[in-house]
Amino acid sequence: MKKDTGADVKKDPSVIDASPSKALFIDMLTKDIPLIRAILDLVDNSVDGARRLRPDENYKGLRIDLDVSKSRFKISDNCGGMLILTAREYAFRFGRSDDAPETPGSVGQFGVGMKRAFFKMGKKFIVESKTKNSSFVVDVDVDKWEKEDKWVFRFKDFSENIKNSPDDVGTTVTVSSLHDNVAENFDQDNFRTRLAQELATAHLLSINKGLQMSLNGIPLQMRDLTLYMSKQIKPVQKKVDYKVKDHPVPVNVEIIAGIADSSPKDAGWYVFCNGRLLLEREKTSITGWGEKDGGKIPLYHQQYARFRGYAFFNSDYAELLPWNTTKTGVDTDSPIYQSVRLEMVSLMRPIIDFLNELKESKGENEEKESQLEKILSSTKPFKIEEIDSFAKIFETPKYKKTEKAADTVPIQYRVPKKKAEIVKKTLGAKSWREVGEKTFEYYLKLEGDE
């Protein structure tokens, strides 16, 4: 195939033809991203439409519907549609151009995500979009497009200065001639289940604010972020604005932490960027666990199963947020994230202290509820958006050791149950704790030095 640079090479023998191969570009573009992540990129674009349409983040009435099968992939929304100018000059380009308009508070950005998803899934794609005053259709056969010399797409149809019904405004993307492995995945129940879970998790904040999402006609479940609160126990909140050089708008950060249900599976930190969940149930050094300096946070242990922390990063300039390019995690080298991580450790420390004291108080009397347990049982779960009074430092009652607890140590060991039952009956003990105390006293009396 003749390249555009061919004439230049003939005119100047010092010119080397370095024009890219579309086939190689497509292969490299799609090789390292999992299928579900590619789909999430398309959903991110629809969510951005909802954010543009409803800056107040009340998404009631807006929807994003996905349909997957072994024959096609389809995503449709009623989130405002895409302008023809945006499609023509920005959305279909490979990489974000310097003059691309900012999308305040965006989750995705015009770059490679949308095209990468198309190429990842199949050989044909159609994009249909309508705004209040325009509409367009882009219909691409990838095999034919690869053979073309120019790196352009073409409108199959477009209209401007028209009036569309509000019910028709939105975007629909259909990918067909699916690659064999993609068709096989779409046909499997376990893949569709994982896709639904990841969609619901990634956009749980938007779903909680009224945005309806469905997969193959089944609505994705809403998941509330909750913390326990009472007169004696209050979760903590801190808000910080970070200014970045040459950017007029700061990165707004809100950190909220406290206690919730005892659930090892759900415990940890949840980190969001512009409403998109990046880290879920995070319990490693990334969020300060095992921190030896400063707050000295221990490694995660099951006694911290009640800990919940939420960190929200928001900015009109998405490139300032501490997320990686695939939005699968945080950029731990980001100066903003490093600063926020120190704040997270600081807010976490009193909560860890309380959970340590809670465990210690349980050991004082195994058969009676400790004072801290009684206080904890009086708390109730609240959605974090319903909490109107946070503490600056996590507030809990001070734990006071009883004299008995201060002068005693726990002794634990395990024995075969049948033999233990015999000893319990012989001693006339009513509990295993009493068995332990009486056998210790018996040994001390015979072998001790009292």
Image (cartoon, rainbow, N blue to C red):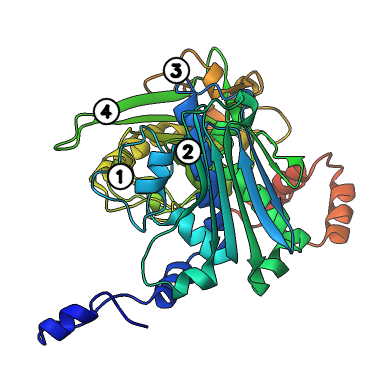
**Nearer the camera: disc 4 or disc 1:** 1
Q: Amino acid at mark 1?
A: Glu
- How far separated are the C-alphas under marks 4 and 1? 16 Å
- How far separated are the C-alphas under marks 2 and 3? 40 Å
Tag 4–tag 1 contact (CB < 8 Å): no
Which residue is the site of mark 2? 82
SS at circle 2: loop
Q: Earlier in the sequence, mark 2 or mark 1?
A: 2
Which residue is the site of mark 3? 390
Q: Amino acid at mark 4?
A: Asp
Q: Is residue 249 above or below residue 98?
A: above
**Nearer the camera: disc 4 or disc 2:** 2
User: Residue at horizontal 47%, vertical 30%?
Assistant: 51
Q: Which mark is residue 319?
A: 1
Q: Amino acid at mark 2?
A: Met
Residue 61 rendering spot, x and y as whole percentages = 64, 24
Residue 369 visible from this viewpoint: yes
Q: Earlier in the sequence, mark 4 or mark 3?
A: 4
Q: Which mark is residue 241?
A: 4
Q: Which mark is residue 350?
A: none
Residue 443 visible from this viewpoint: no
